[in-house]
Amino acid sequence: MLSLGDALATVAEARAFRRNPLEVLARRAPPGRCGRLHIATRPFDVVSSHEVATAILRDPRFIKAPGPLAPLEAMPAALAYARVIGGGLPLLDGEEALARRRLLGPVYARAHQQQLLLDDGVHGRARLLALIDEHRGAAGHDDVVDLYRVAARFAVEKLFALFLGQSCEAISNGIVVGLDDAAAAIDAAAQSVLPWTLDGPWPVARGVRRARETLLSLAESALDTLPATAPFSAIADSDRAIVVDEILTSMVAGTDTTALSICWTLTFLARHPSWCSRLRQEAATGSTTSLTAVIRESQRLCPPLWQTPRVPTQDVVIDGYRFEQGAFVMVCLALANRDPVFGDDVDAFDPARAARGGPSPLSFGHGPRSCIGGRLALSTIEAAIAAIVDSGDVAFVDPDAEARPLLFGLKREGGFPARLTPRVTTASSSASASARAG
């Protein structure tokens, strides 16, 4: 039985965990190590070792953790996320997940091929710059742009164009508003202690249902006009419910992670302008080496998902650490990506790190259950960063704002409001941009 002092300390740590889980996790399991955390209800394992995290993500004995198996403090947010997102691939495991991957594989492959034709067209650079102009006026200043909203609309329009064979410009803002509602509902659930608050007339429950209904209505309306040539059309004819689930997954999980990656990459570039100059110089030659390195390093420091939960189906020992059957395991990608195996300066932004070798960051998971849309997301991120860097300089309203962990993604305190100053281009840079557009 806990003493009064221990009980008060546990409650205090539970509150700290809900405010900023990464700080608490880093104390118990610093980068490169594993540990155990006991907050108010039951203990759970924390993995911050890159080697152990990689092994777990590849090991079929570790299954994705359903919301009810999460510690009580994490359960409401996990359940809210599951209710909003539907039954898409990220929530599936085992044979059901393998069957869904086999079904979706050709769809994603076909979409990736089509994306190459879209990057320089109406859904590429020109559309992105138009969205920037449309969203000027953020934070009460005419010259400030909400970069997250721009990136989210760009990402969701690209996804709709690829998978549904149609533009969603008319409803993309509504989708992003729905995503804002979903994020607010999930964040509110994260501040709740008891999972039953997601049922009944409670404000948290109403917010979750409203977000789900809004996004579901938008997904259904898009399917009603699905052209026969769209990658999803063959599946939609036989199983509309699967397509609806996957569209919801793309809208919620795919859009948010892609938009956050775009915004964090621009944040690091604004703090390290010399890399902007390097990207522009390489773009003039058609090279994307530095662009790839910059995005990789940004995702190492601020991965699209900062944690992913697992549950071992049997006792497993990895690198001397024992994971008990049925235990909740939080694989902390954000801390594993700062494992000392990445070098002595793991907290520094250093895109040249990739050229020196070493492990790959755990950005979109790892192994056979990694994100099926990771390649598409990277292409979208690359297109956005290249276009924005080429068109001007980015200066954030609050350049030193820190990351705030939500359920899965890392968001910035105060969002991503920024000023974009158009760049005076030379004849050679204008010619290279014209060559890319052609």
Image (tube, helix red, strand yellow):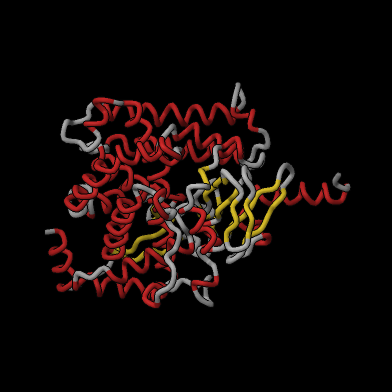
307 relative to 357 in the view: left or right:
right
- Please indicate, yes or no, whether residue 318 appears anywhere in the rendered image: yes
Q: Quadrant of the C terminus?
A: bottom left
Q: Residue at x 25, y 41 (%)?
A: 107
Residue 413 or 322: which is nearer the viewer? 322
The residue closer to the viewer here, 6 or 185, is 6
Q: Nearer the viewer, residue 291 or 96?
A: 96
Image position of 248 with respect to 30: above or below: above
Residue beneath the point at 30% across and 26% down: 239
Estimate the x, y position of residue 396 in percent, counting from the top left.
Answer: 44, 61
Q: Which quarter of the rendering shows the N terminus?
A: top right
Q: Is residue 178 left or right of residue 278?
A: right
Image spot of residue 377 (x, y percent): 33, 52
Residue 227 at x, y percent in the picture = 18, 31
The residue depicted at 65 percent of the width and 42 percent of the height is 71
Q: Nearer the viewer, residue 368 or 111?
A: 368
The total number of labels drawn is 0
Q: Position of residue 392 (x, y in %)?
A: 30, 65
Q: Residue 19, can we see it?
A: no
Which corner quadrant of the image does residue 40 belong to? top right
Q: Is residue 368 above or below residue 95?
A: below
Which residue occupies the extreme top position in the image? 200
* Residue drawn 46% across the image and 71% down it: 349
Does 70 appear above or below 339?
Answer: above
**Res 390 → quadrant:** bottom left
Task: Give left or right: position of 126 versus 343.
Answer: left
